[in-house]
Amino acid sequence: MGQRVGAEGAGAGGGAGARRFELDARRNLGVWLDGVCVSGPGLHLGYQLLERRLPCSNGGLLRNALAQVAIDELIFDPLFVGTFFFTTGLVEQQHLWRETLPSLRRQYWPTLRGAFLASALFTPVQLVSFRYLPVRTRVLVVNACDVLWYAAVSIGRHAEGKVPPIGHAEGGNSEVTLAC
């Protein structure tokens, strides 16, 4: 189904295990379509609305920039994590009721925690971009940061049965399959 690209390296904690990284074309298409058709346009519209209500670009008020970052991370992130499940489920031809919704119920909160962690790493970058850049440029900066966010969300979305806990393999070797 997906194309594989193998890469072996040392296991976690100095173990002798190998890791295999797997690229899944359908999954990558789902992530790309979500960015191009859902979150990209959604962020653009959301940021325009925020800028109208809480102007802060081009050196505006710091409190408005902080409010915009907080809204982005606390309201937009949960919304886009949810839509990500549906977009990727559609592309991966999952049955809505039997696969996508149960997966959403099981994986939403762990995935959202990963998304919050990724967003937290880039909060300073977002604050600077929200305060000093025009909205049209802001989306580009946020999208560059969102490479890590998408990785976290994609791993969380597809975590079921894909990544065994580190250190639970027999004989000290562990094989971890990560799909990008």
Image: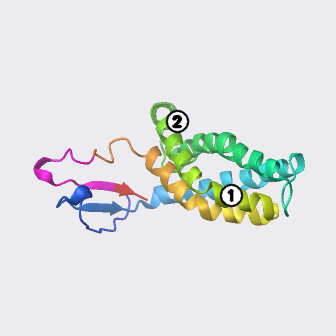
Residue 18 placed where, x, y %? 22, 62
* Residue at the left extreme, as displayed: 171
Q: Which mark is residue 21?
A: none
Q: Tag 2's secondary structure?
A: helix
Q: What's the residue type where badge 1 is placed?
A: Gln
- The span picked out in magenta is 166-177
Residue 2 placed where, x, y %? 38, 60
Quadrant for the C terminus in the image? bottom left
- Where does label 2 land, which residue? 96
Q: Is residue 114 magenta?
A: no
Tell me the quarter of the picture where residue 164 sits: top left
On screen, residue 93 versus residue 7, left or right, reads: right
Q: Residues within 10 Å of mark 2 (few under 14, many from 20)?
A: few
- Where does label 1 land, which residue? 126
Q: What's the residue type where badge 2 is placed?
A: Leu
The residue drawn where x is 60% and y is 61% is 145
Q: Could you tell me if the residues under marks 2 and 1 are in contact, i.e. CB atoms within 8 Å? A: no
Residue 165 placed where, x, y %? 28, 44
State how far apart marks 2 and 1 are (Cα): 34 Å
Residue 174 placed where, x, y %? 21, 53
Q: Is residue 170 magenta?
A: yes
- Residue 30 in view: no
Tell me the quarter of the picture where residue 138 sits: bottom right
Q: Tag 1's secondary structure?
A: helix
Between residue 3 and residue 55, name the one nearer to us.
55
* Residue at the front extreme, as displayed: 62
